[in-house]
Amino acid sequence: MCGIVGQFNYVSTLFPPDLWEKIIAMMHRRGPDDTGLWTDNKHCIFGCKRLSIIDVDPVANLPMRSVDGNYILAYNGELYNFQELRNELKLKGYRFYTKGDSEVVLNSLIEWQESAFNKFNGMFAVAFYDLKNKNILLGRDHAGIKPLYYLLGSQGILFASQYDQILAHPWSKKLTYSKESIELYLRLGYIPPPLALLDNTYMLEAGSWLALDLKGNCKVHKYFNFIQSQDINKGLLKEDILERISVSIIQSVKSQMVSDVAVGSFLSGGIDSPLISAIMAKELRGKLPTFSIGLDNKNLDESEEIITYAKYIGAESHMETLTDNLAESLFTEVLDSIKEPMADEGIFPSLLVSKLARKHVKVVLSGEGGDELFWGYYPRQAPIIRNEANEYNTSGRKYFSFFSSFTERQFKRCFPEIEWLPSKNQIFNFDSTDPNENARFMRQYEFEMYLPFILLKTDRSSMHHSLEVRVPLLDRRVIDLASQIDFNMCIDIGKGIGKMPLRNVLNKFVPRQTKAKKGFTISMDEWIRKPLRGIMEESLQTLRGLEYFNINHKAILELFTNHIKRVENNGMALWQLLILDQWLKRYIA
């Protein structure tokens, strides 16, 4: 696991080494084990920070140059099928001088160019430079587990693992805010790919690559799409389908346990991480360290369930409690870690559990992806599947209401110039009375739009503590099988629960499981009223990021006043404004 940054110029002008030393140092937490810098002193420069996990020998450090000297690789990630690809490349005459996956990625891109990305099963962000032909290739994994930003300008391209690195480069200094990006942030609490905060800056979408040559010819292509079908049902019994899913998950967990350093797992009181942990504990014969966070809010705390799960699977449990007293100090750490505006309150426990885990291990496995693939967000998905009568005109409008921290009335009052629904996003105009169509529509959105937000939180919080997090449920084999089943196999309307295939696998390991996860979160309503109130009041005076809009200051202040008086619970809406203001104060203003 690493951080990468670099620049490709159309003309022979590169910025001085001291600038690059500063920009590379900004991602030190992503890779404290080694620093690498390569340049041809004309058109291209690559920088890497390495967190050594597989093949910790310095010969595997990055950037990595091919044997013939014609290709350079900057690589952040892990490839879980690298041994199979290594064997395939050996048959084609390639020789290997390292034991890890970086050299496999390099030689795969030499051999197959852009087609190599579709062969990779893992998590990655890649930059690959061809010195002879003077062109660069960027790529990102199929699910968007590892981030990759870029700035495409008149002089060339700049790329980085962190958005603050883009902001630190001279090319970004004259860029202005993207109004479209801020509008989406106000609606959703984050900026979805391919957009980023400033004009001409982007996040490369999941499952995509970008190719650019010396003449400025640029091509962006999406090599992986979450295409839903139901072919798995043909000719197979339900038990056979569930068994295929079970086998793929177990195989995925085993392949992602491969490491030259200590490995553990995150453990919650839900379904996904207990399943991952149970498989790992069986493989390690109970010698599995698990890491969890308890809360002093009893309505959200899962400590009892976590302790029970750890006992069932025979794992070693490490737990800390997130209290209100930590809110203000952790808020500073949140701003240090997120690198771009994102208002997921789950970042607080994510940072704390990553810090806890890093005291013991360098790698953990986690359960991200289960909710998105197997209809795990039952409270917001069930009403749409049932097509319940409501005041909204379409299924899409009803669905959108679950993702906004503002009510439609609040949003229109606070931001009278901004449309409630994104005009360029047709998904929220979706309307159907067919339960299957509604279910497929929601899962498509969860995977392509919401999951990247969750993964970004995980990446930011774990990398802040130099911890690698692997996500077995997003293995391409698991995704392929999940994409072929329908919601009826995943949701039990009578019991009010989802993720039935995952529950089926977990039943093999534990005698009892929880009905519903309480959520890896904190009570933002109370935190805005108490420990974060002073910071919130400060931000309401400035509201950075909203200067380009005709906002209704009175309406925004009413949100806060009504919240403090407990007339309404507006904690998450206020949290969005707080994060935007404080992030801009730190990184731009």
Image: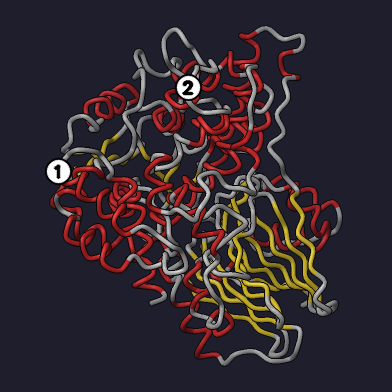
- Depth check: 420 or 462 in front? 420
Task: Look at label 2 and name its amino acid.
Answer: Asn
Q: Which residue is mark 1?
A: 565
| Disc with the residue nearer the chain's start (2 vs 1) | 2
> Looking at the image, which residue is at 53% across and 42% down?
451
Secondary structure of residue under mark 2: loop
Report whether residue 67 is seen.
Answer: no
Query: In the figure, 467 relative to 149: above or below?
Result: above
Image location (x, y in percent) of residue 521: 31, 40
Query: In the figure, 75 relative to 252: above or below?
Result: below
Query: In the figure, 449 relative to 456: above or below?
Result: above
The residue carrying pointer 1 sits among few (fewer than 14), some (14 to 19) or many (20 or more) residues within 10 Å by Cα, namely few
Image location (x, y in percent) of residue 65: 70, 73
What mark, if any, has residue 390 been given in the picture?
2
Image location (x, y in percent) of residue 346: 34, 45
Q: Is residue 227 left or right of residue 287?
A: right
Task: Look at label 1 and name its amino acid.
Answer: Lys
- Depth check: 228 or 98 in front? 228
